[in-house]
Image (cartoon, rainbow, N blue to C red):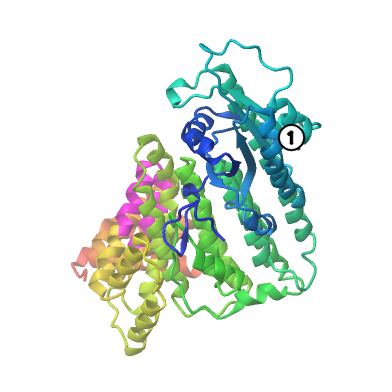
């Protein structure tokens, strides 16, 4: 349950960046309201070093906090809740009472009631702040031997002196935040907040660990465990520790993958069978700025398909990497994410309509490429481009596969059955999300599948982008041996022998440089047909001679091409070349 103090973007979404660590305040509320703004500004003014336990690396934290009134009726629910983002991390009590008699007659009882609530719920992260205001120009009297602050400390914090703090003449604006007393208060509050987070995280991690150790229990659910650990990731993200939050998702990713691999050699857990239903939707939604509550509820009730769950997990990893200004890592992980998801479908033997996986891959690739367009720094774009080219090539292969299935390749005539396949594939891409990148990727793919002309245009545009990206990264072998051969195959179907020959010749040069004999033979077998068709006698004879003398070919192939060579030479002499 989200606190009203922490705004979210819409009822059905959650945005962690909108949240701040919550601290409650009680006591003299008018006093605190006057100090609230300057206190918040002072806490977030400087970073503080946070050394966590178990040898974890030191982190610099900037504490942007939010203060809310203490509500004793909500404490029990907040303590029992697993929601780390909306529960208060610390409770404070503020007073400016300096009169001992007033303290004894009124204030002590008020603090006592507040402390009873702390003890009742075993809350140890609390602090009492006494604000002492004096007019130093007029105040000439000596301070009493025992002050109200001393009395509060002895009554409520005798063994926890760090839980009772005082400040003399606090500033009224950030401009005057330089007094040593105020700086000491801010430093102490920061340390207490970090100590509170340390305790909270240690306890929460122990609970996660205990639940993970029960994974062999038939009633254990990874979906429940996922949401449990994700709360820790939310809290770390709220503190600006994006790399630490990413570790939580990486652990969940690895654990989920391991469960799927283990299912091949043992019993499939009950929760995993929920992911084995036939694939009915293949929409892809990545890079959601806001977290969908609807999707989290679907994970909780185990109503998300395997691909939808993989998309959600990758979108969270990608969002954290983008927040940490590491877009090249998104590009680096993207291809692995796609291959792993496709592999999971095969491992779990999930029934998928023909072409549905290819549609899903193409949507994912389109959205991943869109995110790179938001990167402005040239050095980051350069890093991303190294991983973009393989992604484009993978898209090209899947698009060709889709064109073959739907009868959209050059020279094909679309049948009624193939037209029905296109309609089925388009209906399964209805995402139901308003994410512009997802909507655009679906619209583009639907247009591509609408006709052979649109398909050919999109295919050639994608191929050109892939080959130019490989060349930009000086990966000439990949450009010509991967994308080039794919284009040669496409131009074979379109009947453009000249362009087909051009790409095959470029690939052959690379194979000859590296002495890849088998690839040389395979390419020459294709080139022989091209040279014969375009009437290039010299190249035809030369290629036939290479094949006839190649030890990589069997004798039948060698003899056949030797005979073709002799026949071509004879025809060229008599002028009977067709």
Nearer to us in this view, 479 or 191: 191
Determine the main secondary structure of the stretch shown in magenta.
Answer: helix
Quadrant for the N terminus, please.
bottom right
- Taking the magenta stretch, the answer to whether it contains residue 470 is yes
Residue linked to disc 1: 55
Nearer to us in this view, 511 or 570: 511
Q: Position of residue 268 (x, y in %)?
A: 72, 74
- Residue at 66% x, 57% y is 82
- Taking the magenta stretch, the answer to whether it contains residue 304 is no
Residue 233, above or below 188: below
Outermost bottom residue: 416
Q: Which residues are magenta?
A: 462-488
Residue 229, above or below 355: above
- Residue at 47% x, 44% y is 323
Nearer to us in this view, 140 or 59: 140
Q: Is residue 262 left or right of residue 297?
A: right
Numbered-mark total: 1
Q: Is residue 73 left or right of residue 560?
A: right
Q: Position of residue 378 (x, y in %)?
A: 35, 36
Nearer to us in this view, 74 or 94: 94
Q: Position of residue 331 (x, y in %)?
A: 46, 49
Q: Position of residue 478 (x, y in %)?
A: 42, 50
Q: Is residue 549 visible?
A: no
Callout 1: few (<14), some (14-19), or many (20+) C-alpha neighbours within 10 Å?
Answer: few
Q: Is residue 112 visible?
A: yes
Label 1's element? loop
Outermost left residue: 575
Residue 276, above or below 3: below
Residue 204, above or below 129: below
Q: Is residue 304 left or right of residue 445?
A: right
- Residue 100 falls in which quadrant of the image? top right
- Residue 99 falls in which quadrant of the image? top right
């Amino acid at each position: 349950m989200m606190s009203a103090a922490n705004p979210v973007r819409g009822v059905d979404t959650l945005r962690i960046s909108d949240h701040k660590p919550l601290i409650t305040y009680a006591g003299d509320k008018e006093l605190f309201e006057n100090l609230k703004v300057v206190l918040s500004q002072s806490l977030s003014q400087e970073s503080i070093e946070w050394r966590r336990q178990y040898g974890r690396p030191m982190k610099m934290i900037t504490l942007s906090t939010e203060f809310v009134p203490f509500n004793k009726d909500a404490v029990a629910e907040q303590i029992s809740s697993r929601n780390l983002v909306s529960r208060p991390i610390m409770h404070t009590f503020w007073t400016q009472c300096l009169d001992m008699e007033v303290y004894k007659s009124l204030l002590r009882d008020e603090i006592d009631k507040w402390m009873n609530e702390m003890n009742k719920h075993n809350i140890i992260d609390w602090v009492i702040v006494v604000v002492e205001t004096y007019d130093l120009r007029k105040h000439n009297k000596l301070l009493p031997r025992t002050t109200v602050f001393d009395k509060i400390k002895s009554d409520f914090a005798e063994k926890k002196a760090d839980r009772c703090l005082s400040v003399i003449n606090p500033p009224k604006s950030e401009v005057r935040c330089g007094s040593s007393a105020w700086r000491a208060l801010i430093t102490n509050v920061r340390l207490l907040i970090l100590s509170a987070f340390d305790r909270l995280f240690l306890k929460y991690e122990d609970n996660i660990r205990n639940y993970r150790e029960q994974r062999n229990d038939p009633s254990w659910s990874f979906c429940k465990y996922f949401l449990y650990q994700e709360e820790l990731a939310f809290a770390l993200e709220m503190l600006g520790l994006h790399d630490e939050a990413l570790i939580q998702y990486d652990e969940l990713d690895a654990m989920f993958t391991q469960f799927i691999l283990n299912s091949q050699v043992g019993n499939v857990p009950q929760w995993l069978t929920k992911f084995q239903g036939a694939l009915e939707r293949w929409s892809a939604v990545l890079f959601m700025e806001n977290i969908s509550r609807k999707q989290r509820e679907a994970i909780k009730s185990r109503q998300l398909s395997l691909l939808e769950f993989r998309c959600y997990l990758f979108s969270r990893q990608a969002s954290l990497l983008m927040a940490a200004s590491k877009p090249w890592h998104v590009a680096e992980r993207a291809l692995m994410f796609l291959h792993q998801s496709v592999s999971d479908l095969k491992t779990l033997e999930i029934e998928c309509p023909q072409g549905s996986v290819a549609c899903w891959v193409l949507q994912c690739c389109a959205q991943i490429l869109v995110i790179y367009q938001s990167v402005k720094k040239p050095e980051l774009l350069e890093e991303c481009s190294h991983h973009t080219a393989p992604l484009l090539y993978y898209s090209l292969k899947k698009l060709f596969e889709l064109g073959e299935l739907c009868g959209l390749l050059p020279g094909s005539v679309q049948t009624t059955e193939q037209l029905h396949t296109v309609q089925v594939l388009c209906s399964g891409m209805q995402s139901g999300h308003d994410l512009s990148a997802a909507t655009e990727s679906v619209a583009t793919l639907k247009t591509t599948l609408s006709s052979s002309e649109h398909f050919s245009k999109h295919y050639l545009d994608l191929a050109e982008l892939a080959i130019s990206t490989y060349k930009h990264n000086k990966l000439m072998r990949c450009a010509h041996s991967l994308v080039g051969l794919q284009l040669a195959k496409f131009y074979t179907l379109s009947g453009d022998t000249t362009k087909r020959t051009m790409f095959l010749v470029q690939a052959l040069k690379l194979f000859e440089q590296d002495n890849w004999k088998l690839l040389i033979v395979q390419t020459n077998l294709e080139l022989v047909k091209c040279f014969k068709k375009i009437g290039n006698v010299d190249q035809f004879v030369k290629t036939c001679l290479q094949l006839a003398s190649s030890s990589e070919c069997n004798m039948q192939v060698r003899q056949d091409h030797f005979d073709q060579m002799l026949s071509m030479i004879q025809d060229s002499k008599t002028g009977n070349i067709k």
